[in-house]
Image (cartoon, rainbow, N blue to C red):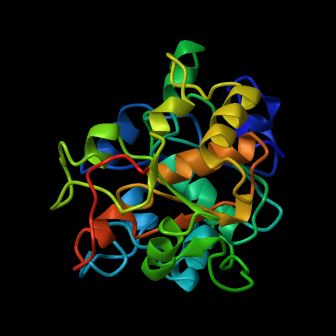
Amino acid sequence: MSPLIEINDPAFAGANTILIDSRGGQDSYQRYLAGHLKNAIYADLDKHLAAKVTDASIGGRHPLPAVKDFAKLLGEWGITSESRVIIYDDKSGAFSAARLWWMLRSLGHMQVQVLNGGLQAANRAGVVLSTEAYTPNSVKPYHTHGDYAGTVDIEEAGTAAQDKSRIVIDVRETPRYLGQTEPIDLIAGHIPGAANLPYILNLDAEGKYLPAEILRSMYIDAIGDVKHDDVIVHCGSGVTACHTLLGMAYAGITEPKLYVGSWSEWSRRDLPMATSERY
């Protein structure tokens, strides 16, 4: 199953389809009520897709929720192993939609897709939006088979960044990577040895993913001869990195891993930091 779905796909009306509107920000619920796809469940990045932050130096600004808590939430949303889950956000899929896609895939739920272009694509297609909150029929907690797969911790990320047989990709904007500005975290810069490939390069002018073959060429140029399971992707807090992981999956590169804590964790530790290009 492709990780992306277009707005005109008949799967949106499928009997087993669960549609999720996933957003972030303090006004996310108000934006959801202002207009969302009919029968879309509201999901909030901070409330539903991350654990409560007590110390960002341990896990970053958006640490993953405990699997048992996330499994309970999935059951409340009516998601079972048979569900086809379609997710979108209002940031062209670059924000919490890709994060939720990654979380589900990490737990082994492969029938999950992100709306290519997000809510903006639905607006361009003339889809009539709903302003009424949707309440799903809950089921028992989702049955999981262990912890989130495909993650690395801060120690492995730091080691891999210094290993020429591996690569750590930082998908934040280049000025943040180079330490020229830092609008969110405490210190500007990047993990020494990490390469920069901003996630925004995944998108065309309309906020849709570039064709798979173009993405694959871009990623392979960045990765080189590194084995795909030796690729680690991170961002500021493990959110927009998922956008690139989705793009990689779309391009047929399915093994890279996520460093969830990302720069928000690394920059709060007494660790080396760089402000120049990788090599």
One can see residue 214 in this view? yes
What x and y, as percent, mark residue 212? 74, 31
Q: Is residue 252 left or right of residue 89?
A: right
Q: Residue at x 62, y 76 (%)?
A: 148
Comparing 212 with 33, the one in front is 212
What x and y, as percent, mark residue 160? 53, 71
What x and y, as percent, mark residue 155? 45, 81
One can see residue 21 in this view? no
**For residue 144, above or below residue 106:** below
Q: Is residue 275 left or right of residue 214?
A: left
Q: Residue at x 42, y 31 (%)?
A: 35
Q: Residue at x 75, y 84 (%)?
A: 145
Comparing 131 with 158, the one in front is 158
Outermost residue, front side: 279
Q: Residue at x 66, y 60 (%)?
A: 256
Comparing 124 with 131, the one in front is 124
